[in-house]
């Protein structure tokens, strides 16, 4: 979908939901990192922690840019990860919501 397929209001709703999901992902990650860092006691646990953090960074950076061409997929992924809910998407047209719901099922 291109930017032309979105009304100004829909872009605002989608952008707000996207930013909300990003913020919630960081908040959840901080909780996990605090828990896991308390368990660091061997070199192997440190490298495993590093690998986990690198993976999380890759995922975060992959969703750090708001792009109307891919936003339905991004929002569906955030729904699946419980970072946003359908109430966060109130204001999107029914067709877009239906597509998000369908993509979130898989």
Image (cartoon, grey):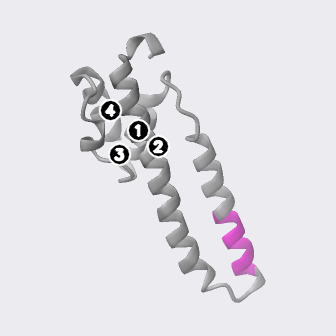
Q: Nearer the viewer, residue 54 or 84?
A: 84
Q: Which residue is denoted by mark 4 in the rendering? A: 100
The residue lying at 38 percent from left, 17 percent from top is 6
The residue lying at 45 percent from left, 30 percent from top is 71
Q: Secondary structure at mark 3?
A: helix
- From mark 1 to mark 4, how far is it between C-alphas? 16 Å
Determine whether label 2 and label 4 are within 8 Å by CB: no
Residue 59: horizontal and vertical position, in percent? 59, 49
Foreground: disc 3 or disc 1? 1
Q: Which residue is denoted by mark 1 in the rendering? A: 16
Residue 89 part of the magenta-drawn span: no
* Residue stretch rendered in magenta on the structure: 44-52
Q: Residues within 10 Å of mark 4 (few under 14, many from 20)?
A: many
- From mark 3 to mark 1, how far is it between C-alphas? 14 Å
Residue 15: horizontal and vertical position, in percent? 44, 34
- From mark 2 to mark 4, how far is it between C-alphas? 17 Å
The residue lying at 34 percent from left, 24 percent from top is 10
Q: Is residue 2 visible?
A: no
Disc nearer the start of the sequence (3/4): 3
Q: Residues within 10 Å of mark 3 (few under 14, many from 20)?
A: many
Determine whether label 3 and label 4 are within 8 Å by CB: yes
Q: Which mark is residue 19?
A: 2
Q: Is residue 18 visible?
A: yes
């Amino acid at each position: 979908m291109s930017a032309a397929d979105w009304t100004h209001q829909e872009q605002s709703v989608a952008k707000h939901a996207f930013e909300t999901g990003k913020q919630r992902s960081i908040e959840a990650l901080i909780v996990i990192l605090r828990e896991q860092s308390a368990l660091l006691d061997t070199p192997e646990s440190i490298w495993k922690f590093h690998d986990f953090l690198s993976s999380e960074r890759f995922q975060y950076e992959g969703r750090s840019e708001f792009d109307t061409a891919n936003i339905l997929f991004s929002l569906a992924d955030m729904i699946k990860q419980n970072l946003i809910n359908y109430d966060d998407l109130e204001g999107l047209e029914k067709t877009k919501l239906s597509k998000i719901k369908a993509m979130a099922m898989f």
